[in-house]
Amino acid sequence: MSGERHATAEELLAVRDGEGSAWAKAHAAGCAECGGELYRLEQVRSQLRALPAFVPPRDRWGVVAERARRERRQRRLSGAAGLAAAAALGGLLLVAVQGTRPDALQAQTTLRSAMARSQAMEQVLQGVDPDARALGGEAAGAVVDLQRRLETIDARLGDPAQWGNDPASQAQLWNERAGLLSALVDVHTTHVAYAGL
Amino acid sequence: MADTIPLAEAQSLVARARAGDFGALEHVYRAYERSVYTLARRLTKTPEDAEDVLQETFLEVCRSLGKWRGDGSLWGWIRQVAASKALMRYRREKLRATEVLADDAAAGSTVDVPLRLDLEAALERLPERSRAVVWLHDVEGLTHEEIAELMGMTASFSKSQLARAHQKLRAWLGEEGAGR
Ligand SMILES: [Zn+2]
């Protein structure tokens, strides 16, 4: 035994972890009692590591994925709403300066925010990784259907005879377009075909 | 606990997850659910708490897997998330002050505990914070500095907690307890 005292538990743990002082290492090497305690501490650690793992009693993935998807959708929608609000404010200022009548102003604002919403969703859709896009199964069928409906809307928007000089019906078409784009983003990112869209 | 997904695979999974691929996220969940739940069981009081930690951890993983830098092990990052979720729970429950007292009272009574416990029961009997230190250090391999940061204490306090916990385990396991 080297030195006039035994090593403390803390000193021996430091030796076990490869961080002990020179004194503690030398003492543990020469003192049967402390050497035995050091061995015991190593054994306890091995036994702790060998304890069997716990198995979760229930599969929580469904709950986690559902909540994560909802959060993503909300973030996306609030992002689009923010852009739409900014665009609407821009439109409001512009027409205010031009001195347009209030009802026309309202219609213009609605139209601008619908267009902004559609543009925002378009950007989100472009941001979806091509590798992650839904390419098979039920989801792929939904994509084809949504794209067909999108083409129909685009055709109507491209034909002024369909909406004339009515900003309200034009806005409705843009809003429908944004909704279809949003549904497309959902299908691509979740690979789940939502019913009712 | 070892990382069950090789680094290259983890990096490609994370790239897919960033693009919104829930299949990649599910793969990560399946690979680590047991490890996270086991860690949570050791760091919380009840199986129900551990299930909540499992859920909160993976929701956080879904939200911020993009923050994983891709250099260290993916398990190391997820473990950090899980440990902080678990430890946040009892910080929230404000057990700290009462636990220190319970801890001291238990320390005095350990000398004359007649029964010999098995390791599982002895571990269970440790005060929550001591058990967390033992588990994070001896099993998960976290340094005292890492534990200190997670638990909001100093590294030297973590060291003395570990030593006291091992003294209790020794008393409860009995002399031959460690040799089994
Ligand atoms: Zn000694």
Image (cartoon, coloured by chain):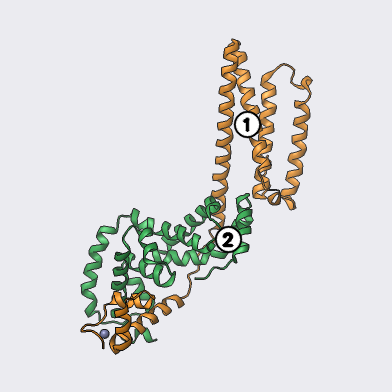
Chain colours: A orange, B green
Crowd rating for badge 2 (residues with CA inside 10 Å; few <14, some 14–19, many 20+): many
- Residue B159 at what x, y percent from top left? 31, 69
Asked if labels 1 and 2 share a chain, the reply is no
Quick one: A102 or A84, which is closer to the camera?
A84
Specify whether residue B44 is in view. no
The residue positioned 72% from the left and 16% from the top of the image is: A165
The picture quadrant where one finds residue A32 is bottom left
* Residue annotated with mark 1: A117
Locate the C terminus of chain A by quadrant: top right
Toward which corner of the image does residue B44 lie, by quadrant?
A: bottom left
The residue tagged with tag 2: helix, strand or loop?
A: helix
Foreground pick, B84 / B108: B84
Tell whether A16 sits left or right of B109: right
Residue B19 is left or right of residue B36, and the answer is: right
The front one of B146 and A163 is B146
CA–CA distance between discs 1 and 2?
A: 34 Å
Secondary structure type for disc 1: helix
Residue matched to label 2: B28
Q: Are marks 1 and 2 in contact (CB under 8 Å)?
A: no
Q: Residue at x 42, y 57 (%)?
A: B84
Give the residue type at disc 2: Val
Dot 1, crowdedness within 10 Å: few (<14), some or many (≥20)? many
On residue A158, the disc is: none
Q: Residue at x 35, y 78 (%)?
A: A15
The quadrant holding residue A39 is bottom left
Please provide percent x and percent y for residue A148.
78, 38
Chain for mark 1?
A
Does the beta carbon of the residue at mark 1 sit less than 8 Å from ligand 1? no
